[in-house]
Amino acid sequence: MIGYFDSSALVKLVVEEAGSDEAAALWDGADVVLSSRVAHAEVRAALAAARRAGWLNHRQLADAKDLWAVMWNALRLVEVSVEVSVDLGQLSGDLAEEHALSGLDAIHLALLLPADDLTIATWDSRLHAAAHRMALATLPAKL
């Protein structure tokens, strides 16, 4: 089974919060774990925002960043090549419009299509709903 993790799921792997156990179980149980290259910036931004909001102290942030570096190296990245970038841009735009997604979430979803034997891990409500409407397996099963 293939597990695709968006940034909301990846953060749960490096910071203990609701859904962390589910995300870890998918990570551990997947034959392959995938994400987009944009996830690195998204995860680091989320960790920095958590520090600024006081949800993480300095030590917790450092630990999360260290763990993230290890996990990032374990991910197989879904790359956007020049050949597919025009089609991906068009598809992402269509998905963003149809499902009220952010640009980055639309890119995550577009990278998965077509998808066989894949579960998308996301705690983003709009991305989760869009994946569900497109008959993709999701973790968690319901938000």
Image (spheres, helix red, strand yellow):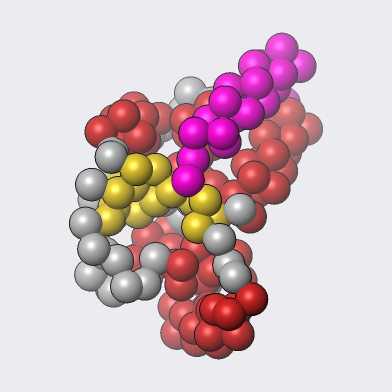
Residue at 39 percent across and 51 percent down: it is 4
Q: Position of residue 110 (x, y in %)?
A: 46, 72
Q: Is residue 36 left or right of residue 138?
A: right
Q: Is residue 116 left or right of residue 70?
A: left
Q: Is residue 95 left or right of residue 117?
A: right
Is 43 above or below relative to 114?
Answer: above
Q: How many marks?
A: 0
Quadrant in the picture for residue 81: bottom right
Can the viewer see residue 51? yes
Q: Position of residue 136 (x, y in %)?
A: 26, 64
Quadrant in the picture for residue 51: top right
Is 74 above or below relative to 2?
Answer: above
Which of the pair 8/143 is nearer the observer? 8
Residue at 71 percent across and 43 percent down: it is 45
Q: Residue 67 lies in magenta, yes or no?
A: yes
Residue at the outermost top position: 59
Q: Is residue 47 left or right of residue 18?
A: right
Quadrant in the picture for residue 137: bottom left
| Magenta span main SS | helix
Is 69 above or below relative to 85?
Answer: above
Q: Which region of the structure is painted magenta?
A: 54-76
